Image (cartoon, rainbow, N blue to C red):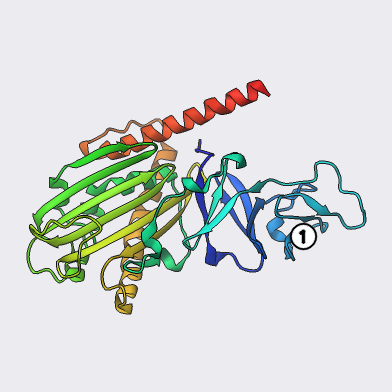
Amino acid sequence: MFLQNAWYVAAWASEIGDGPFTRTILNEPVVMFRTQDGIVALEDRCCHRALPLSMGKVVENNIQCGYHGLEFDASGACVMVPGQSKIPPGAAVRSYPVIERWGMIWIWTGNPANADPGHLPDWWWLDHPEWKNTPGRDGTPMHVDANYLLISDNLFDITHLSYVHTTSIGNTDIVDFPCKTERVPPRSIKMTRMILDRPPAPFFKKAGGFEGNVDRFIITTSDMPGYIVNHSGTYEVGSDPEPGHVSENIGVEMKVMNMPTPETETSSHYFYAHCRHYKIDDPEWDEIFRTQFTKVFEEDQTVLNAQQMRISSHPDAMEVDINGDAPNIQVRKMMDELIAAEQTELAGIRRSA
C-alpha cells in the first residue's frame, strides 16, 4: 500500500518530448505530454476501448487515442469523437496535478484538492550558484526491481558503505561510530553519524587530496513519502565546519537527492541527483561524478534486486534487526502511521458519501 496524498517524481523534464510518454506510478499507468501551457498527466487508458493513450499522438493541446481518434484535453475530458457531434456521458479519464521544478516532473497521486505545492521539499541548493547539480544517469531514472522502502532502508543504512562501496564512498571505519536518529515534525526522519579521525574513503581522498585522517559527517533526512537527502562532508581533523559550509580549502561537501517512486509493490523508478559544493566549474569533476556515482548506484541496484527476489520467494521468512537499523525502523513506522491515517480518512469519506 502507498501513501496517495503526496508528490512523487514522475519523470525528468528532459524525458518528455513532443509525443506521449508513459510510466507506471503506484500501480497506475500514466501518460504525460507537453502542451503550450505545460506538462499534462492523464490516466493511460482510453475510456472507449481501453487502448493506452500513449499509443496515440498529441494534437495541439490534446491527446488523441490511436484506436478510434477520441481526443482528451488537459482535464481528462473527452472533447472530440470522430463522426459524431455529441460527447458520450462520462467520457473522460483521470487527470493528475503536476508541477515542473528543478528539472523534474512531480505528480500528485491523491485527491487533487489536496495538491499543495508547499508539500514539495525545499531543495534550494539545486539552483544555487555555489552548488553544482548533476542529474543521475544523465537524466534517466534507474529501474530497480524492489519495493521503494528497500531503497529507503539502503539510504539510511550507512553501515553498508563499509561492505558494498569499499572502492568508492565507504570504508570499514564507518561501523565504529553510532548514529543518532530524530523524528522531525511533521513528517521527517533525520539520521546523523559523525566519523572522527579516520582514513578517508577512496572517493573523498581523491576529491579532497587528503594525506592523513579526516573527520566526516553523514546526515540523511527523509521527508515522507521518500524525498531522501544524503548530506556528507569530509574535512581536516578538528576543523569542525557547519554542515553546508565546508570550504574547498579544508574539505569536500556534497548532497545526493534520492527520489524513489513506486512503480509496483516490487519495483521502483529511482531518480537521483548529486550536488557538490566544490570544484563546481571543473568539467573533469562533472565526469567523475557521473561515472563514479553511476557505479555506486548500480552496486546498490544489484543488492536491492537480490533482496526483493529473496523476499518475494520467502515472504514469511523472519528478519532480525541490528543497531544500525534504527533509522530505517523509524522511517517505516512513520510511513505506516501516515498511510493508516490516510486510509482512516478515506474510509470516513466513503461512509459519509
Residue 220 position, x and y percent, is 29, 48
Residue 256 position, x and y percent, is 34, 58
Q: Is residue 297 left or right of residue 313?
A: left
Q: Is residue 40 left or right of residue 205?
A: right
- For disc 1, the marked residue is 66
Residue 36, visible in the rendered structure: yes
| Front-lying residue, 292 or 42 | 42
Q: Is 248 placed above or below 315 here?
A: below
Seen as rendered, the residue at the extreme bottom is 283
How many numbered callouts? 1
Q: Is 106 placed above or below 189 here?
A: below
Q: Is 328 placed above or below 33 here?
A: above
Residue at (50, 38) in percent of width and height: 2
Seen as rendered, the residue at the extreme right is 84
Residue at (39, 38) in percent of width and height: 187
Which quarter of the figure has residue 209? bottom left
Residue at (21, 58) in percent of width and height: 233
Secondary structure beneath dot 1 equals loop
Q: Is residue 95 left or right of residue 317?
A: right
| Front-lying residue, 130 or 154 | 130
Residue 200, visible in the rendered structure: no
Residue at (31, 77) in percent of width and height: 281
